[in-house]
Structure formats: C-alpha cells, structure tokens
Amino acid sequence: MFASIAINVVVPAASSRASARGATRARPVAPLASSLASKNPLSERTGASLGDRRAFARRRASSLRARAGDDREGSVGGGTGDNGRMHVPTDAFGGMSPEYKAASALKSLFTMVAVRIVMAQEAGYDNEGGAMTPTYKGLQDYLQENPLRDGNKWLEALMRHEDNNMRLTALRVLEVRKAYAEGQFDFKGMSSLAVEELTTENDKLMADYVKDSMSLPSTEGMGMDGA
C-alpha cells in the first residue's frame, strides 16, 4: 500500500518536470513562427491558398535568379539586362564580346613579345658580337617569311617546322608568353592608359570639330538651296 502511494506520488512529479521542460523548450517556437509568418505576405495566417503561396515562392526564386544573373552580366561586357551596361549586339564581333575580342588581340601581342624576348635572350648569348645563334637566325627568317597576325596559328605552324630546333623554340615561346602575360604585363596600367589616351583624343577631335564649325561661312539670310 505504501509502495503504491509512493509510486503515485513520484510519477506525477516526474511527469510534471518533463512537462515543464517540454514547455520551456517549446516556448521560443511560437514567436519564431509568428516572425516568419509576418515576413511572408502569403503565409497561412493571411488565409492565402496553397497555390498562391507556391506561386509566390516561384516568383521570388525567379527574381533572385534574375538578380544574380544581372550581377554576372555586370562583370562582362555587352550586358543586355537592366544593369546599366551599354548593349553591344552579339554579332558585332562575330559572336564575341568586346572583352573576348580584346583578349584575342592580346594573345597575338603576347606572342610577338615572347618572340622578341627569346630573340633578345639569344642575342645575349652571343658574347663575340655580330654573329647570330641558330635560334635567333631561325626566328628572324621565319618572321620575315610568315608575318605574325594570329599568335596561335603562327605558333601552330612553327611547331610543325622541319627543323627540330625551331619546333623546340616554339615550345619555348609558348612558355615565355604565358609567363609574361601572368606576371609581367601591366593590365591595370594598360586600362588607365587606354582611357587616358581615348579622353585626350576625344578632346582633340571635339576641339577640331568646333574650330572647323566656326570657320564655315554663315548661312543666315540664305534660302533652302543656299541662294
């Protein structure tokens, strides 16, 4: 009898403690749910249907993707979205962006720079002066016979040269142009110089235009045919 009474007393106490702990853990959930619901204009608390809530979620996801797309477009030329960039038609440079077109031109420039660096290195190997190493003479003759217009095509042809030394020289030029592009060329300085030169030329052209306009004969009092 006493055991039964003890059990009856202990069990409710344990249950009460568990219930109290459960209530303590559950207490923050209600404000959190309320906060989330208040941020969603189509939450269940507004009485919106499930279809409306799903449509809202799809529109929001689409908006976020579009915003991310605008950010990506903003980092590359020719943006067509509402990102404040000028629109460059995709067929303006054969489907290439202006940046890609400029990069292609730089590849040929870097190839020529690498060729000149290798030739300068070969000239430095000649301590007697006046003579030319086989590599220097080979590059000089090859450049005269094959003007460098497209860096990749020029190197591709040099790699098929009948002389094994010239084929090895082509590999050397490959490494030099890569090293120069990665660590020697001043891209930031080029950007500043390009804008500076363009601004100077624009100002000069505008000044010449105004000067020429002021020197034109006046057309006041003349008819439509200039008479």
Image: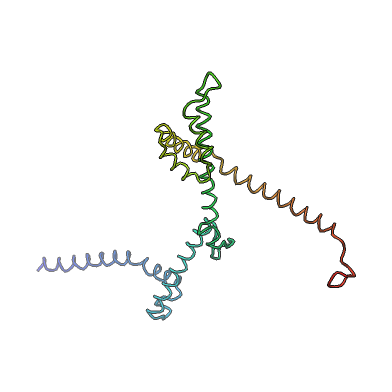
Q: Is residue 14 left or right of residue 4?
A: right
Q: How is the image coloured?
A: rainbow
Q: Give how far across and how far down residue 156 sits, in percent.
A: 43, 43
**Numbered marks: total:** 0
Q: Give how far across and how far down residue 153 sits, in percent.
A: 46, 45
The residue lying toward the viewer, choosing from 199 and 68, is 199
- In the rendered image, which quarter contains the N terminus? bottom left
Residue at 39% x, 81% y: name it: 49
Question: In the orientation shown, which residue stands out farthest toward the right?
Answer: 221
- In the rendered image, which quarter contains the C terminus? bottom right
Residue at 51% x, 52% y: name it: 100
Residue at 43% x, 76% y: name it: 42
Q: Is residue 20 left or right of residue 197?
A: left
Residue at 41% x, 79% y: name it: 52
Question: In the orientation shown, which residue stands out farthest toward the left?
Answer: 1
Question: In the orientation shown, which residue stands out farthest toward the top?
Answer: 128
Q: Give how far across and how far down residue 148 sits, in percent.
A: 52, 42
The residue lying toward the viewer, choosing from 134 and 94, is 134
Q: Give how far across and how far down residue 43 sits, in percent.
A: 41, 75
